[in-house]
Image (cartoon, rainbow, N blue to C red):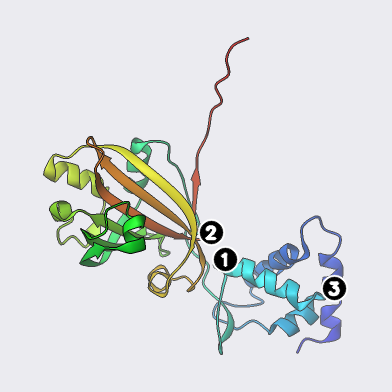
Amino acid sequence: MPSSAEALPYPGALAGGRNPLYVALAKTLAGDIHGGRYPIGSTLPTEGELAQRYGVSRHTVRQALRELKEEGLLWSRPGIGTKVRARPESPRFFSGIHNISDLLQFVDATEMHVKSRREIVADGAFAELLHCAPGQAWSETNIVRKVPGGATPLCYLQAYLRPEYAGAIGRARVIKRPIYSLVEERYGVRIVEVLQEITAARLTPEMAQALKAEEGQAALRISRYYLDKQGAIVEVGIGHYPSGRYTQSTRFRAHHAED
């Protein structure tokens, strides 16, 4: 238990700022973690102890801890408590994707490690997600995308190919080119359009384990649909990016009529 003397400096240090109190506390805790007060692998004090130490409410502590979990500094499980995790070597990947050429450059900067493959039939809500008719067959490949040399995975990718194009991936364990370009090269198909949808999601247990993240952690789900010149979907890629690891930038230009 921290002493009352230890708790005295913190209320004044956190008060009077422009940010919400939990944001200030999160920054203070992050500084304590990086400074070695709470070493990697150590268990943080309880919410009550932190509240007393920093002179704030338990609710404020809870919000601050949530922030640090989403940044990847902490993880917690019932019966274990809240622990300090190793800080990601490559905490955030930034890309500006405006066309298919930009997408190609993004993939060239990463590599894909194949985890598993299976044949599936899309029904119900899953068929809706893949933008296909119920009962359509697909070849599913589960992939972890990484920055070469980086220890922290960037994304959990589920790639879906129509069965007639499944040979484009073959038995490869590491893929360093866009999957759609492998399809184009092998089958003579030309991808002329990519539809992209972005939504918020949560990591499943399988995804969290593969990404060295926390089950249920907030994630960005980016779904891309690759269409040929007939408008048919050749490939679907559904990527889950844990919070704090990826930023995508898009610039819009306004066109004004001259006076």
Q: Quadrant of residue 50?
A: bottom right
Circle 3 packing at 10 Å, graded few (<14), some (14-19), many (20+), is: few
Looking at the picture, which amino acid does disc 3 mark? Pro
Please report contact status of discs 2 and 1: CB closer than 8 Å, yes or no. Answer: yes
Residue 238 x/y as whole percent = 36, 56
Residue marked by disc 2:
244
Q: Nearer the viewer, mark 2 or mark 3?
A: 2
Q: Quadrant of the C terminus?
A: top right
Task: State the SS at label 1.
Answer: helix
Per the model, the C-alpha gap separating discs 2 and 1 is: 7 Å
Q: Secondary structure at mark 2?
A: loop
Judge from the rendering whether residue 52 lies leftward or rightward of residue 109; answer left or right: right
Q: Is residue 86 above or below residue 160?
A: below
Q: Position of residue 48 (x, y in %)?
A: 74, 84
Q: Which residue is mark 3?
A: 9
CA neighbours of label 1 inside 10 A, class few (<14), some (14 to 19), many (20+): some
